Amino acid sequence: MTYTEAKTTEEIIMESLAVLRKNVEVTELRILKTTKGTVSGYFSDYQELADVAGEYDGKVPAIYFTLNPTKTDLLSRAANRIVQRAKNTTTDADIECRRWFPIDFDPVRPAGISSTEEEHQSAHTRAKEVQRFLTERGWSEPIVADSGNGAHLLYPIDLPNDDESTMLVKTVLEALDFQFSNESVNVDKGVFNAARIWKLYGTMACKGDHTDERPHRLSQILSCPEELKEVSVEQLKSLAALCPTMQTKSKSASKKSNTEEGFNLEEFIEQHELDVAFSAPWQKDATKYVLSTCPWNESHTNKSAFIIQFKNGGIAAGCHHNSCSEENWQTLRKKFEPNWNPSSKEESKKESQADILIRVSDEAEFFQNDLGEAYAAVTLNGHKEVMKVKNKKFKMWLTKQFYDATKRAPGSDAMNQAIGVMEMKAAFEGDERRLQLRVTEKDGAFYYDLANEDWSVVKVEPNACQVLDEPPTLFTRNKNTKAQVLPDFTGDLKLLLNHIRIKNEDDQILYLIYVVTCLIPSIPHAVLVFSGEKGASKSTSMRLTRQVVDPAVQDLLTMPNSMQDLAISLANNYMPSFDNLDGLSAEKSDLLCIASTGGGFSKRTLFTDDDETLLDLRRCVGLTGINVVVTRADLIDRSIIIELDRIPEDERKEERDVWEAFEKDRASIVGGALQTLAKAMAIYPDVQLDKLPRMADFTRWGFAIAEVLGYGGERFLQAYRKNRNQSNEEAISSHPVAATVVALMMENQSWSGSVASLLGELERVAEQEKINTKVKTFPRAAHILSRRLKEVKSNLEDVGITFDIRHAGDSKKVSIQKSGGNVVPIRPQQGTLKRTGTDSNEVTDNELSEDYDEFAGW
């Protein structure tokens, strides 16, 4: 049926979601490139979603939602509301299942502008062709939609959210891209991920300025069948089989590419009157020629035949029909040139250095990682090593292979040519694999990379640890990766306390548990913060800690100035440890939060205009500073802050003695940590806690580890709660609004009134309590006060203060309640920020002002 257009934006959105969603499912609304960064929220109330989207419609380039339903737990991030500068958005792991197979037809045009009417129409024409093609293959009728600049087809599917489904959807899109993308319209093959955001129908597509030639248009569903029938897995796999895969070692000759240096393929096509439907760029510097009629079987007239020419001269050809499965470029060439003999031609041709390099590289196994980077797995001395194809070490290995074969050295040009071919092999022949740094998980077991010359790893299972020389997983290493000692599994983790001067027993418990949790992959990791005055051994303590968890050539790092450099440091170090910090900007604090709990960082790929490189971050971050360098509530909630005392002169040791003593115990410490984890794995499934704080995984694992170490889980919870309370006091005392609210509620059980009147009351209390209101983060208007209160809502709740802000006619009303007499008295030092028990290391009002300027984005 034709989709009935509604009268208002909100009505169109509601009607669209009624078609695309089953019952009430949680979906993320995401708005990019607003003046407040990325805006995101999770909605089960679609009317609320529509209302919010309506407020932004026409003011931003586009408004999106998650096409597949998200897990209901995500509603807790922002339940039926939006947050600005969102730090966490939906990842593939957050999707319940795959409900839709999306096809996006995007007209080719300069980036950042709307399409012309001609470009817009060409996308819809191409969509009709694809729909006809799929209908002929037995696919059901899809939802047809207008994206505003191009066209969409949405086919219902029912697939689990797993790697197999992702690869299937990706391959099907690549098959459609190959067969239908041309110089005018692209079939977007990048929309395969489960968490793909999609244009919210009913909102305007507003890329660039609205002009007569390139107008802004409404995105909307154009038609929807009376009954939506799911496309089967078999139908998807059948279509996926049409995607060309260039495998030189494939059993199928149709997928073999041949090097034809200097061969003019276009002249060959014209000379033999091959019926080319269209030609277009494809993949990395290749050109595809899709043929209207198959040259091997003239009855195949559905554009099933193809020819591909690669930049290096390689040519591949084939037809998707089973009856043509044995056809390839050689059979095509001999069909039109019967006297052509490729073998004699090759025999008469002298093998070049590049050819030799390619030949001797056959021992390597080429593949690409999840970021599209080329890697090679090479067997050396009986074990397998993983190297980047462009890495110096791989080039050295390749040079050795060449020298062993020829007793000569290869030239630089030949090396570069060969490396290009090997990158092609990784892209077209190899699998896509996710490489891990230092720790990973597979089939319920944890693996720890010792990073030694034998490429050994430790396999950790419940109650068992063993060293494997041939692990089932692949790790990646970089220049800063250093080998770990061979662990002594009979050792004792508590020996570490002989080398790290932590006097408080609560902090000792938290520290040891932190070290063990760093060995657990795929969970959020706490941020370890060492603070203390000069001479407290903060840097040495952090270095020793890193030697246990993630040994590195440069174990302590300087905090980079740019966000991109910080993201790269986080990506390249499993335990990035930043030393001697004075403070953190709001942006860096947010990025460390992402690294703690897991997330991605996007940056432009070098030497490209629009390619994107995604850095997947989940790290064990360490920070040191004289002052407590974490001041923002989000990062404090994720941190374990341990204050170290200054070492008396009569207890000081030379650094050489410190390290000699540590190295004697290191194997026992590392082995003890791994064995502790193994025992904790055995009891972890039985750990059930009534309440979990923000770092829920850390808390539950911490309970199990504390049981193994003999402290007891309840003792850990007490220590962790105490540390969080102290950290929470830091967050409140360093936040002028929070500190003032606490002071106000010390003498009141409750308070209610307009937000504007609360601002006046807080100004009065601040003056009475000598709290500095001249910093830019102390609000000057009621709407700013509402924002400041929300920043520290959870922190205030932790000290017994709750508040609620509601609309009341022309103004907002705020109600503040005190839970009994539980409010913790927190009085910020006048002009300084101090850690409990510290009588120096002050942070001035000016420094606080600068920090909060960054925090607020002023």
Image: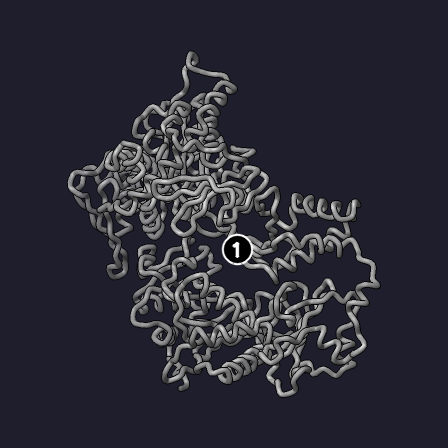
Type of amino acid under label 1: Arg
**Which quadrant is the N terminus positioned in?**
bottom left
Relative to the observer, which residue lies in front, 125 or 318? 318
- Relative to 16, does residue 376 appear above or below in the rendering? above
Asked if residue 391 lies left or right of residue 830, the reply is: right
Secondary structure type for disc 1: strand
- Relative to 684, does residue 134 appear above or below in the rendering? below
- Relative to 246, does residue 594 appear above or below in the rendering? above
User: Which residue: 27% across, 46% down?
Assistant: 692
User: Which residue: 32% across, 58% down?
Assistant: 75
Q: Is residue 368 visible?
A: yes
Asked if residue 131 lies left or right of residue 13, the reply is: right
Asked if residue 346 lies left or right of residue 758, the reply is: right
Residue 396 lies, in percent from the top left, at 69, 44
Residue 362 lies, in percent from the top left, at 66, 55
Task: Tell me the residue that label 1 is attached to.
Answer: 433
User: Around disc 1, counting alpha carbons within 10 Å, would you say few (fewer than 14), some (14 to 19), or many (20 or more)?
Assistant: some
When asked about the image quadrant of residue 114, the answer is bottom right
Residue 399 lies, in percent from the top left, at 72, 46
Relative to the observer, which residue lies in front, 512 or 148? 512
Relative to the observer, which residue lies in front, 519 or 620? 519
Residue 421 lies, in percent from the top left, at 69, 58
Relative to the observer, which residue lies in front, 79 or 282? 282
User: Which residue: 46% across, 21% down?
Assistant: 661
Q: Can residue 582 be seen in this view?
A: no
How is the structure coloured here? one colour
